[in-house]
Image (cartoon, helix red, strand yellow):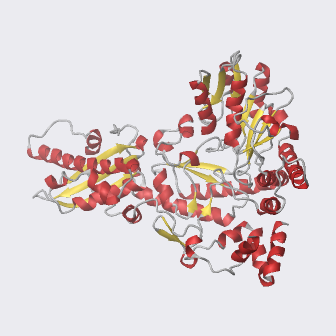
Amino acid sequence: MLRVGAKKLAGLVPRDPSSGPVRVLPRLYHERVLDHYNNPRNVGSFDKTDPTVGTGLVGAPACGDVMKLQIKVDEAGKIVDARFKTFGCGSAIASSSVATEWVKGKQMEEVLTIKNTEIAKHLSLPPVKLHCSMLAEDAIKAAVKDYQAKHAKLNGSSDSAEDAPLEKAADA
Amino acid sequence: MASKLLASALRRSSPTTAPPLRRLLSTAAAAAVAEPYEDASSGIVMKGVRISGRPLYLDMQATSPVDPRVLDAMLPFYLHRYGNPHSRTHLYGWESDLAVESARSHVASLIGASPKEIVFTSGATESNNISVKGVMHFYRDKKRHVITTQTEHKCVLDSCRHLQQEGFEVTYLPVRPDGIVDLERLRSAIRPDTGLVSVMAVNNEIGVIQPMEEIGRLCKEFNVPFHTDAAQALGKIPIDVDKWNVSLMSLSGHKIYGPKGIGALYMRRRPRIRVEPQMNGGGQERGIRSGTVPTPLVVGMGAACELAMKEMEYDHRRISALQERLLNAIKEKIDGVVVNGSMERRYTGNLNLSFAYVEGESLLMGLKEVAVSSGSACTSASLEPSYVLRALGVEEDMAHTSIRYGIGRFTTEEEIDRAAELTVQQVEKLREMSPLYEMVKEGMDIKKIQWTQH
C-alpha cells in the first residue's frame, strides 16, 4: 500500500486522469455573467439634463445594489444608445450590461416588455441572484418613465418646481 | 523524520526516486506546486479566467496551511505508531498515549495552564458548544442567564439561541464602534443568576482584541464563570489563563498551522468549573468528550503550539510589517478606504477593509488571483452584510463593501505587493462603473437620496 503510494508520488505509476484531484474546478458563475462582468458593455453616462436622455436609478446602497441605466431616444421614439453604471455584485453588473444591449435599437414601448425572467434565463442566474434581473427590468422602466416625464414637461405646459431627474427617478 | 521513513520505504522499491519524494513531503509549497492538475502548463481556469498558478492565499482567519514541521511530527502516527491511545495493554497504546500527553502539555504551556486542564475536542466549535451549553446545563437549577456579545462567532451565538429555546435568558451585548466591549455595560448586565460570560478574545472577522484581563477581573468580582473563544488568538497574542481569569477557553488547531479537525478546551480546575458532556460514550478525556482521541491530529496540534510558542514574537513582527505594507500600499493609491474595527487593539494578521462605493462581492469576483473573503467563511454564501460589521454600527452600504485580508506565517512580501496592486486595480475599475462614486464626485449626498428599497 505504502509502496504503491510512494511510487505514485514519485510518478512511476502512470496516472489515471479520472482518479486525479479535481480536474476542472467547478464554475461559480455562468459564462455570460463572467463575460459581461469582465467586459461590460456600454459603461458610462449621458448628460442627464439632455432632453433626449432618460435616466433610471433603482436600488439602494443599503441593499448592496444600485443600478443607473440611461437611454438616448430619437424623435421616432427609438432608443439609439444606452449606458449604465452599477454598484453591486457581478450578476447585477452583468444584468445591467445585458439590459443596455437589449434596449438599443428598440422602440420605447417595445423595451417595456423585457421581463426580468428573460434576463435571468439569459444569464442563468441562480435564485439568490434573481433580484439583480428584477432590478435591471425596473431600471429600464424607470429610464423610459423618466424620458416620458421629461417630454411631457417639454411639450405640455411648463410645470412648476423642477426636480432633479436623478432624485425623481430614485423616487419612482 | 516522517519523510525519512517514507523515503526509506521507497528506497526499497525504487532507489532512484527518493530525493523528489522527500522534497514533496517536507515543504508545503513544493507539494502545492506539484499538485497534478492535468493542464498545469496552461494554468488553472476559474471564474472564467486562466490563472497562471494558484491564487495567493490571504484568508488565514478561515484556515491556515499545515506547517511542514507539524506534518513531519504527525506522519509517524498515521503510518506505524497507529495505536489507540486508550489501549492499556500493549506498546501501541502506550506510545500513542505518551504522544497525546506530550501534546497536551505543549498546548497547556502555550496558554499558561496545567496539562490536566486541557480536553481535546474536534475543534473550537465543539469546545464552544461544550462551554456554553455544558456549563448552563450543569448549573441549570441556579443559573438561568448568559451574557455574550453581538460580534461572537456563529457557534457561540447559535449555542446561545439554543439555550434561549430551552428557556434560558441571553444578553447579547452591543460593542462600541471600534468593536470593543463596553465594560460598564457588561458590569450592569451581570445578574445574580448569570451563569456564564462568553466573550471572544480575537474577533474572526475584524481581528479586534477584547480587554480580556479587565473582563476577567469583572467576572471574578461577581464570581461568574468566564468563557472565551480564543481560536483566533492562540499562538498569535500572548495568552495567560490566570491573568485573564478565564474558566473555559476554546482553542483550534487549524488556525495555528496545525491540522483541521482538532481543537481543545481549557477547563479551570481551581476553582473547578464543571460542564455537562455533549457527547456520551467511553468516557475519554475525563468524561467531558467521549470518543477515541485522534493521536495524529493531537500530535499535530501539540507540535503547532510548540512552534507557536517559539515563533510567536518573530511571526508577530513579520506579520505586523506585512499588514502595514498592505494598508499603506492600498491607501496610497485610493481614497475612501476604511479599516473596520480598532486599529490599536487588533491582531495584526487581520485587515478588514471597506472600499466606499464598491460592492464587496463584485470586488471579490474581480480579485481572481487573491484568495480573500468578505468576512467569515461561514457566512460567505449569504447576501446579507456581515452581522459583525452591523454590530459595529458600520453603515449598511459600507458593510456591503468589506474585504478581509488574512496574513500569516507563510505570507511573503511579494504576495502582499501583488494583492495590493490587484486590489487597487479592481477598485478603480469598479468605481469607474459605480453610480454612487459618480454621484459623490458630482457633489451629491447619497445619504439624502430617497432610495427605493427592494
Instruction: Give left or right: position of A146 versus B344.
Output: left
Residue B265 on image: x %, y %: 76, 39
Total numbered labels = 0
| Most distant residue in the bottom direction | B16
Question: Which quadrant of the figure contains the N terminus of chain A?
Answer: bottom right
Out of B139 and B27, give the one closest to the viewer. B139
Residue placed at 84% from the left, 52% from the top? B306
Residue A4 on image: x %, y %: 72, 74
Residue A23 visible to an observer of this rendering: yes
Residue B173 visible to an observer of this rendering: no
Q: Relative to B161, does residue A68 appear above or below in the rendering?
A: below
Question: Which quadrant of the figure contains the C terminus of chain A?
Answer: top left
Out of B398 and B187, give the one closest to the viewer. B187
Instruction: Give left or right: position of A117 versus B247.
Output: left
Residue placed at 79% from the left, 23% from the top? B220
Residue placed at 64% from the left, 44% from the top? B204
Q: Relative to A48, does residue B181 appear above or below in the rendering?
A: above
Residue placed at 68% from the left, 17% from the top? B191
| Most distant residue in the front direction | B89
Residue B17 on image: x %, y %: 77, 81
Out of A118 and B292, give the one closest to the viewer. B292
Instruction: Give left or right: position of B269 versus B258.
Output: right
